[in-house]
Image: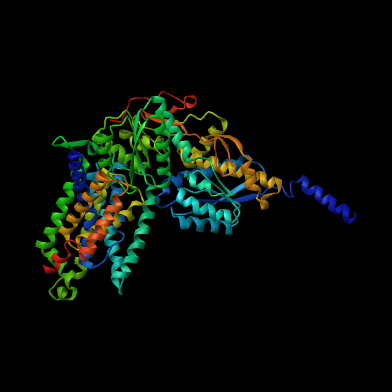
Amino acid sequence: MSKNKLCVSALALSLMLGFGPARAAEFKIGAEIPLSGNLARVGTAMNEGIQVAAEMFNKKNGKHTVKILTVDDESSPAKAVGAVEKLAADGVVAYTGGYGSNIIGPASEAAEKLGKVYITSGGVATELTKRNLKTFFRINSSEGYARALMGMFNEVGIKSVAVVYSTKEATEEVAKMLQTGLGPKGVKVTMHAFDPATNDFKPIIHKIKLQDRPDAIAMIGYENDYVGILRAAKVLKPDIKTIAGVWSLATSKMAAEFPDLMENVSGTSTLSFPAEFTTPEAKEFAETYQKMFNKAPDYLGIFGYVQSKLLFEAVARAADAGTMDKGGIATEMRKTQSDTVIGKVRFDESGDNPEFTHRMGQHQAGKVVLVWPAEAATGKVKYPAVPW
Amino acid sequence: MLELTLQSLFSGVLSGAYYALIALGLALVFGTMRVINLAHGELVLLGAYISYTAEEKLGLDPLASLPLALAVVVGTAILVYYLVSLIKKDRELNSLILTFGIGVILTNAVLMIWSADIHSATTPWYHDATILFDTLFAMQAELVFAGFGIALVGAVWWWLEKSWYGRALRAVASNRDAAKLMGVNPQLTEILSFAVSGVLATVAGIAIYTAKVIQPAMGHHLTVKAFIITVLAGMGSVPGVLLGAVLLGIVESLTVTMASSALQELAGMVLFLVVLLLMPSGLFGRAKRRG
């Protein structure tokens, strides 16, 4: 056999076996995420979704696989940057994870400098997508949360709202979106900022009770804030018609841990509880999650799953196209048009998902019923109704 | 406005009593050993988590979990003492680094054992409202632990002033060598101060678990709060701790009512700085020197 024939035969054989630019490979993906520190709970929940996405992708893709390298950023911006750099040195091709806008900001800038895609659902501040980064992507945003809260308030006809919000970046932003969104519609909005270290909410609720006298209280904070606000409200019993909030509120965890506080409370939610998974993908996700972690998935896990799945698919497409080293993952991410378990996802030039609008769930008799929008509702909103 | 202000003052006093519970243990150890135990907040947290486990797994009322929590927290406090006592040089400075490290280890141990979820007592009685004079509102848990806080501060003060061991403890704090010559065992009294600090941390932990919410990362914040109160009071002053804590609670609460809750922590820090500027020894520092 001549030398040329040998080369051609070898090339043909390698193509038949799937080698060459599109050969099967294991890609390392970095998960920079808080597993300790004050964001450990949310980081851990998101991380579970990431692990489920990897498990499902590796089982299903058949050609490429992913290996998750996880580094705990300890809820610290400086350590998140260090984690991104360490993971790059370990050979990751992209990042999934991140929680807290103030942490995601510097971490994603470090990823941009390294030319690697960074995707998250843990930072909703608008500032994140105003930085003209080419490799930053996220699947949710403040607007999506504010739209859901306003949608439910408008539907039940609320005329005045007292917004109680943490002064952290993302919570303050959602609160101000409520103010600017509801104000022009004739709804009277009063604002009550609180320091994240606050643990006695009675003085705020007392002010709301005696001075504002609103139809509704909107809580824009985190789980410990909700418990504090609801306990204070239960003691002072302001004459309101409903109380609602945003993330980490209308969840099975809150229903199980604080049954005395949650009845009739509403919050943004991707899921009813008990979860009704209708599509084959959602069912598979729930089964895999249950198998891996011996519990039902929560919404943070779902977000972690969706962001990671979209990233893995983009990595696989870029690998097949042979563009991995030429910014191909970011290019493939921008081609995303996917109907996911949190709804439609596509990315605009800034890396944001303009399709994102949350749903509202309400705690009703130990369950979480989706009450807004009508097309996603699994039950009717109870109004007026409060937890006391 | 009067109703708002009265409720604000009442909430401030309740918060202050609970702050005093947290701070007193730190103040006691500093007063006797000149050691700032930066793991004190984590001891409080440990007490809270033991109470949570006792309620969750054994169905015990948070107060009934006190003996179990005391055993674990006091044991841990004595272990901290043992580690601190190994420091032979520059104890004041090196103990800061050591206890900070112990705090980090304890936080991560709590995280590994109990996960990062938030928890709070589920016994409804503690969260029911009590209304005094038709206008003052409080959770029953707040009243119970405000009472505990004031009683414990009084008991510790009485013990330090009147009991032999209390006087021995003050003698060691004042002059270790002279106390030794007078027949006082310094090691035993130092262990005692850590043990009493552990008792106070346990009660503070159960108070927090019962009235508020616990999570693994809060230990550091509790230590900072305790440190502020201890300095505000005058390092080592027991009555000063109660006064400083109540003052801090009232300033924070009035700031929320008169201005904004967003300024609450800032107001506390401003109070701290003003007191330090005008009275560098703290509110009770000078009085203590005279005594």
Which residue is outermost to the right? A2
Which residue is outermost to the top? A380
- The x, y position of residue A343, in whole percent, is 54, 33
Relative to residue A263, is residue B127 drawn left or right?
left
> The N terminus of chain B lies in which quarter of the figure?
top left
Q: Is residue A380 above or below residue A86?
A: above
Q: Does the rendering let one see residue B61?
A: yes
- The x, y position of residue A266, in whole percent, is 38, 32
- The x, y position of residue A167, in whole percent, is 37, 46
- The x, y position of residue A68, in whole percent, is 56, 50
Q: Residue at x 63, y 47 (%)?
A: A329
Q: Is residue A360 above or below residue B181?
A: above
Q: Residue at x 26, y 32 (%)?
A: A238
Image-quadrant location for residue B117? top left
Task: Name the residue nearer the viewer: A241 or B206.
Answer: A241
Task: Name the residue nearer the viewer: B23 or A199.
Answer: A199
